Amino acid sequence: MNDWPEGWSDDRNARHGRGSADAQPEGHRVMRHVRPGSVPRQGVPPQPQQPPRSPRSPDGYANAYDSGYNTGQVYGSPRGGGNNPGGYGPGGPGGRGPGGAPPMPSQSPGARPAPNWGRRIKVGSITLAVVVLATTVGTYFWADGKMRREVDLAKVIDRPAEGDCTTYLIVGSDSREGMTSEDKKRLHTGSADGKRTDSMMILAACGSGNTMISLPRDSDVEIPTFVGSESGKTFKGTGRRVKLNAAYAEDGPELLVRTVEHNTGLRIDHYAEIGFAGFANIVDALGGVEMNIEKGFKDKKSGADFQAGKQTLDGEQALAFVRTRYAFAESDLARTKNQQKFLAALANQAATPGTILNPFKLYPTLGAGLDTLIVDKDMSLFDLGEMFFAMKGVNSGDGTSMNMPISGSRGGNLVWDKAKVRQLVQQIQNDEKVTVTSDR
């Protein structure tokens, strides 16, 4: 019985598969190729065929398994044999991958991809736009909520027709609201109760140019028929003539507007009033206002003491500058010119990118002004901004600054030139360039 597997022999001249005791070594012989796992071991069920793992090339990428494994093909060489000096993949470093695909690029392990700057810039721009929009909207509603809309122009009767320009009646009152005794002493305001108009001017914002017209508080005017702002009672006009500031003292802003409209024939669209404290606080919040004072002057009553030349006025100095009247020969008219000059400079500085785009200036300025600024019920934040930009335009030369034309005086009151006033009002109503001038 032969226990050797088939193909094996006990013949010493044809020993296959075992050692030999002959003195001569065995010659080479060809052995049948057996794939791993093709011959099951006894007692072990056959395992499913697993594809052979491909060896890795020096660059870290695996070479594809080639079906020429059993034909003597060298791994990494072109099909059909041949050498691959680099050992990178089929066809060498510049060859093609499996299926004709280009070889994968070499990349160092752990390397990060290059940043996508275009996407980053786009995302950053969108984020910035959202932040700016949210800040702008929030600031608008915050400032709009602080406005004191206390004047009801709907109570004013017998109003003139609307014109093509937007008109503002801007009033500086001697209100001491919110001031301590030290503030009153420092600002030389006195301690009188109530409030009176310290300055008044009409600002016409027109397409043809802006016009600022000062109304001397000693102007001789007629008090017309009006309806009381608090009582609702009708008070018939008797032709009574008074100083313009008496209208405000008698029944407040509504009667003042009614009196200005009756004596000029010009409709007032909006009303804005600020007191002593608010005026000084706005100037201080801006860091002062630069002025060029042509001639120095002093006034003990207002606390003014100025030298000629360019200088920056703080809140206390600014208030003294616009209130001084006794240092001038034509007291009221000279004061109104100083008020125009200062307000235009104030608006010119407030309505600049350095203030509007700087939150450390914008918010204190808005807070200081809106806390004490009294406006009509229809005044929007947009209207208030238009008013400031119109004042800035006058300061930059894009408009006209003047006193109400005066023809003489009556009992110490200044009488307006009716013909010039009529022409001036007509030009504003029709949005025409103002050509009327004032001799004073």
Image: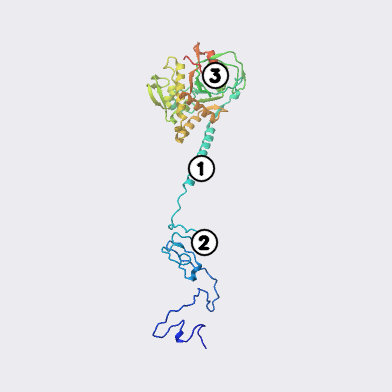
Residue 47, labelled with which disc? Answer: none
- Report the residue marked by disc 2: 99
Q: Position of residue 268 (x, y in %)?
A: 56, 22
> Residue at left 51%, top 26%?
387
Q: Position of residue 20 (x, y in %)?
A: 42, 84
Q: Is residue 285 placed above or below 13 in the rendered structure?
A: above
Q: Quadrant of residue 358?
A: top left
- Is residue 185 visible in the rendered image? The answer is no
Q: Are marks 2 and 1 in contact (CB under 8 Å)?
A: no
Left/right of residue 382 with respect to residue 92 in the rendered view: right
Amino acid type of disc 3? Gln
- Report the residue marked by disc 3: 427
Which comes sooner in the sequence, label 3 or label 2?
2
Q: Is residue 265 placed above or below 117 in the rendered structure?
A: above
Which comes sooner in the sequence, label 2 or label 1?
2
Few, some or many residues within 10 Å of mark 2 (<14, 14–19, 20+): few
Amino acid type of disc 1? Ile
Residue 126, labelled with which disc? Answer: 1
Q: Position of residue 417 (x, y in %)?
A: 52, 13
Q: Nearer the viewer, mark 3 or mark 2?
A: 2
Q: Nearer the viewer, mark 2 or mark 1?
A: 2
Amino acid type of disc 2? Gly
